[in-house]
Image: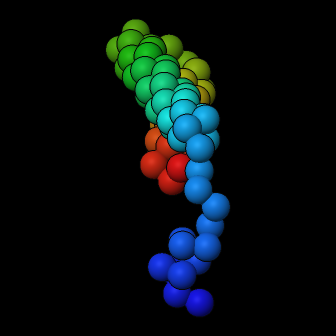
Amino acid sequence: MSTAASAAAAPPRGAFYRFWRAMKQLFHEAIGAVFGVLALAWFNAAFRAWNRDVALWLIGVAVFVALLFVFFAVTSFRRARRL
């Protein structure tokens, strides 16, 4: 079945559906931005700890958490784009 035929067979979506979809997309984009800012804060903390000769495992933990937040930010933005 072609995509044009399946799109024509789909029932029309109402205004509430479009509103709800926009709110979900906005939510995912906002959460992605929050995770991005938190990742920057953790990278900043790791950099400051590195300059102050803190234990290497503490720097590693800060970098790991920052990379985890970057992963969450990217996946959240990708999910918002998929909606």
Is residue 72 or residue 82 the one in the foreground?
82
Across and down, in percent, residue 48 comes to 39, 13
Residue in view at x 54 percent, y 71 percent: 7
The quarter holding residue 28 reads top right
Is residue 76 or residue 65 the one in the foreground?
76
Residue in view at x 54 percent, y 33 percent: 19
**Is 50 drawn above or below residue 79 in the view shown?**
above
Across and down, in percent, residue 45 comes to 45, 15
Q: Is residue 27 visible?
A: yes
Across and down, in percent, residue 82 comes to 51, 53
Is residue 14 or residue 73 the one in the foreground?
14
Residue in view at x 49 percent, y 30 percent: 26
Q: Is residue 59 visible?
A: no
The quarter holding residue 37 reads top left
Residue in view at x 45 percent, y 49 percent: 81
Q: What residue occupies the far top of the structure in this picture?
A: 52
Across and down, in percent, residue 30 comes to 48, 25
The quarter holding residue 52 reads top left
**Is 81 drawn above or below residue 43 in the view shown?**
below
Q: How is the image coloured?
A: rainbow
**Is 36 drawn above or below residue 70 in the view shown?**
above
**Quadrant housing the N terminus:** bottom right
Relative placement, left or right, of 47 versus 83 is left
